[in-house]
């Protein structure tokens, strides 16, 4: 009997169809092995010969003018070193906001094609916005894994649909489900640097806890670097000829702005002159360095932004301190990235490692609505707490530490986006879309230390990596026909500064701020809302209610001279082109609502219609969207427990220090704590005067909401075995969200405590039979 060769052996390997079946050429196979031909083992797919390692770095919320590499005030020596040994791209563009940029980066397609026209928490059912990345849009992780690379993802994700980011999954849109072999990071928009909620693979982990206590020396940026280094070293120790792909995307410098104290101290007094002067200083340095053309203009700062001279002397101290913390966080992050790069060098792998270092998934964030910065992103921006000058001054030394969620002033953001106008979220303007990028590849780039000014877009990164690896974009993956890449490889520009750009048309759209680049021209809308307006008044017709501008970017590098009046036909041509691109790439319908979209009830939700929830000890790390919605309603919590005299610990909690609630035993006493915010006067504790006796007990909290709108008062009654033991008033309650990253936990607490009278994990010392949460309609 003559065996047939594998059906996939013809033209093996066909890298356009993934995955690729192992190749095996067989001979005669008989019932008896002695009569059968000897054959070789199946040949599994490997990367093309000479394919480079790839380190893809994406930093969060950093503007074009923030780093020393691009003329800014924050020292980033490792970014500088890569620029010296590689290329600076000074016309690189993102989508203007987080999840969309990240979806475009890892797929090479436009963000709406990847169903990510807005961040995960604001998704809507339309094809361009539903947050369900189609199987026809394979990621770079999947493509490289199926082509013989080792692949990994470290840090921020923010590409898992809001309703799927639970310990129960489903996991097919988590990093490992999208084709990345290893994931170590977090799923949401941001993370606490000192107490992050992390995931390894699909398993929740809390690495800041050591032997049941918070490690005072833990910090996320260092932890991410440690894990990336270990993973790379393991790859090369076990399989030295197998190239690796590491996607490294820390939460820095998204709020909360947090950094090691010693790094914050390095910047003390460095920004006392203020943001207005900083913008001018950066602009002049950018020209001197050649980062921007000599004839570039500094875009004006819109009148609505905070002016430095309008701040009081005390608030100038506060706002300067905010920038010290931001600078420290970004500088420290760059330092840790330097460790990762050094580890590659120590392995002798740097020469054939393609490093793409993108300094910003969008422009700097001007989401501070006060002009003076924030001590809590969730408290002030989302729930309506008010910062006071007294509190901010008193807590200056806490800025950047675990007990603030600091976000700097809107005007520091604008200074970090020099020389452009506007900021993150404003996809119509370069301040929102244009960020700094450096590419280094010693083996593949010979003209180092130079600037490249060809138009580049975040969708160009996947095609660049694939061309460097000599891997074609697949036409079929797992049986699904693939949407063609939207981006163009940048390799043509590596050794030719004057090569004509190949990415000649690109649309932009985020929350109806939109534009289109075509052959050097940019047509874009005028923003109707400011970057910090979370609840803008939606337009009746986003297609008609926005004015349009026109810029000739060949002559006007920084988008300052609106020539729409002089070129009406060109404007019409580009408006028509936007409509065509919009229809082609699932951009429509336009929707300029923002936080109004955030309610989990607007999306698929296992909890819809559910009013009763039963939890057991160890049911933890349940994200807010999948937890009972204990906001703006009455509810009860009933816990059946068994204790010894003096037992204490957490029964159930949601959120944390910046907004949250907790039912616990403290020195045996049933206790209910509620935090509207991190402000001491916005925290309330209702506690029994007596401790529980040994034995079984039923502990109940009745939370009676006053009604009449969101965030109103409530009366709390605490009962033990049906008898009232304490009661109290909560004058104001959380109207919108407890946290962006903290969770519902039973029998323990993770992240930050609701009040400082205990600390995590505060594991329950008795036994919890069950905890029942009943929502009252």
Image: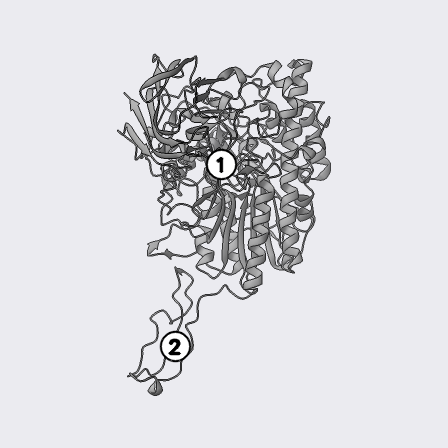
- Which residue is at the front of the view, 408 or 583? 408
In this figure, which residue is indicated by the disc labeled 2? 25
In this figure, which residue is indicated by the disc labeled 1? 98
Compared to residue 646, the image places residue 133 above or below, namely: below
- Which residue is at the front of the view, 194 or 282? 194
Split into 4 quadrants, where in the image is the C terminus? Answer: top left
Quick check: 308 left or right of 474? right
Compared to residue 462, the image places residue 292 above or below, namely: above
Crowdedness near tag 2: few (<14), some (14–19) or many (≥20) residues, C-alpha within 10 Å: some
| Whole-percent x, y for residue 166 in the image | 38, 39
| Whole-percent x, y for residue 40 in the image | 42, 77
Give the distance between the C-alpha atoms of the residues marked 1 and 2, in whole angstroms: 48 Å
* Secondary structure at numbered mark 1: helix
User: Which residue corresponds to the image point at 31% horizontal and 20% vertical from the top-left?
Assistant: 722
Whether residue 16 is visible to the viewer of this picture, yes or no, is yes
* Secondary structure at numbered mark 2: loop
Compared to residue 85, the image places residue 101 above or below, namely: above
User: Which residue corresponds to the image point at 64% horizontal and 57% vertical from the top-left?
Assistant: 350
Whether residue 72 is visible to the viewer of this picture, yes or no, is no
């Amino acid at each position: 009997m003559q065996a047939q060769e594998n059906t996939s052996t013809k033209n093996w390997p066909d890298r356009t169809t993934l995955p690729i079946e192992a190749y095996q050429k067989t001979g005669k196979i008989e019932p008896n092995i002695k009569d059968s031909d000897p054959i070789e083992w199946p040949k599994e797919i490997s990367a093309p010969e000479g394919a480079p390692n790839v380190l893809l770095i994406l930093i969060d919320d950093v503007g074009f003018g923030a780093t020393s590499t691009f003329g800014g005030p924050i020292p980033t020596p490792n970014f500088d070193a890569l620029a010296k040994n590689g290329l600076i791209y000074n016309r690189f563009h993102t989508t203007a906001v987080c999840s969309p940029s990240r979806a475009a980066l890892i797929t090479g397609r436009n963000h709406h094609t990847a169903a990510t026209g807005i961040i995960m928490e604001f998704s809507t059912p339309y094809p361009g916005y539903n947050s369900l990345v189609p199987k026809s849009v394979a990621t770079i992780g999947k493509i490289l894994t199926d082509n013989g690379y080792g692949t990994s993802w470290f840090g921020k994700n923010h590409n898992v649909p809001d309703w799927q980011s639970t310990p129960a999954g489903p996991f097919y849109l988590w990093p490992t489900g999208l084709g990345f072999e290893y994931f170590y990071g977090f799923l949401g928009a941001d993370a606490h640097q000192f107490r992050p909620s992390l995931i390894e693979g699909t398993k929740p982990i809390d690495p800041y806890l050591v032997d049941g206590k918070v490690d005072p020396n833990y910090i996320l940026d260092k932890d991410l670097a440690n894990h990336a280094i270990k993973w790379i070293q393991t790859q090369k120790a076990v399989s030295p000829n197998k190239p690796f792909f590491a996607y490294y995307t820390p939460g820095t410098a998204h709020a909360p702005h947090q950094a090691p104290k010693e790094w914050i101290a390095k910047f003390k007094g460095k920004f006392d002159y203020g943001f207005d002067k900083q913008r001018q200083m950066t602009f002049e340095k950018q020209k001197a360095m050649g980062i921007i053309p000599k004839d570039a203009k500094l875009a004006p700062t819109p009148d609505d932004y905070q002016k430095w001279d309008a701040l009081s002397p005390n608030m100038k101290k506060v706002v300067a301190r905010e920038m010290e913390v931001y600078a420290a966080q970004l500088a420290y992050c760059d330092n840790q990235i330097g460790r990762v790069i050094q580890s590659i060098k120590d392995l002798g792998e740097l020469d054939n490692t393609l490093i793409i270092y993108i300094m910003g998934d969008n422009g700097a964030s001007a989401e501070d609505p006060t002009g003076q910065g924030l001590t809590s992103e969730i408290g002030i921006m989302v729930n309506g707490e008010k910062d006071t000058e007294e509190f901010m001054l008193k807590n200056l030394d806490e800025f950047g530490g675990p007990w603030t969620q600091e976000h700097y002033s809107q005007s520091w953001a604008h200074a970090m986006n020099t020389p452009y106008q506007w900021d993150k979220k404003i996809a119509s303007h370069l301040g929102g879309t244009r960020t700094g990028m450096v590419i280094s590849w010693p083996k593949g780039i010979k003209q180092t230390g130079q600037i490249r000014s060809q138009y580049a877009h975040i969708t160009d990164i996947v095609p660049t990596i694939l061309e460097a690896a000599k891997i074609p974009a697949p036409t079929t993956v797992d049986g699904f026909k693939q949407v063609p890449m939207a981006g163009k490889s940048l390799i043509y520009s590596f050794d030719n500064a004057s090569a004509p750009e190949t990415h000649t048309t690109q649309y932009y759209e985020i929350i109806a701020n939109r534009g289109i680049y075509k052959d050097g021209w940019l047509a874009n809308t005028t923003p109707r809302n400011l970057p910090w307006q979370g609840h803008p008044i939606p337009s009746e017709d986003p297609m008609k209610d926005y004015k349009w501008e026109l810029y000739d970017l060949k002559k006007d590098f920084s988008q300052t001279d609106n020539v729409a009046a002089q070129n009406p036909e060109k404007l019409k041509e580009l408006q028509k082109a936007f409509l065509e691109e919009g229809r082609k790439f699932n951009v429509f319908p336009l929707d300029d609502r923002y936080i109004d979209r955030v309610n989990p009830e607007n999306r698929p939700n296992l909890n819809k219609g559910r009013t009763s929830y039963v939890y057991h000890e160890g049911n933890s790390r349940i994200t807010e969207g999948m937890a009972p919605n204990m906001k703006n309603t009455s509810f009860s919590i009933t816990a059946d427990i068994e204790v010894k005299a003096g037992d204490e610990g957490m029964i159930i909690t949601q959120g944390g220090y910046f907004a949250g609630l907790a039912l616990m035993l403290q020195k045996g006493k049933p206790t209910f704590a509620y935090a509207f915010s991190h402000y001491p006067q916005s925290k309330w504790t209702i506690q029994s005067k007596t401790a529980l006796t040994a034995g079984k007990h039923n502990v109940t909290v009745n939370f009676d909401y006053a009604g009449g709108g969101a965030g109103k008062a409530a009366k709390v009654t605490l009962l033990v075995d049906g008898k009232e033991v304490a009661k109290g008033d909560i004058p104001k309650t959380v109207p919108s969200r407890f946290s962006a990253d903290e969770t519902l936990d039973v029998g323990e607490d993770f992240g930050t405590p609701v009040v400082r009278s205990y600390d995590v994990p505060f594991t329950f010392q008795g036994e919890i039979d069950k905890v029942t949460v009943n929502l009252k309609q």
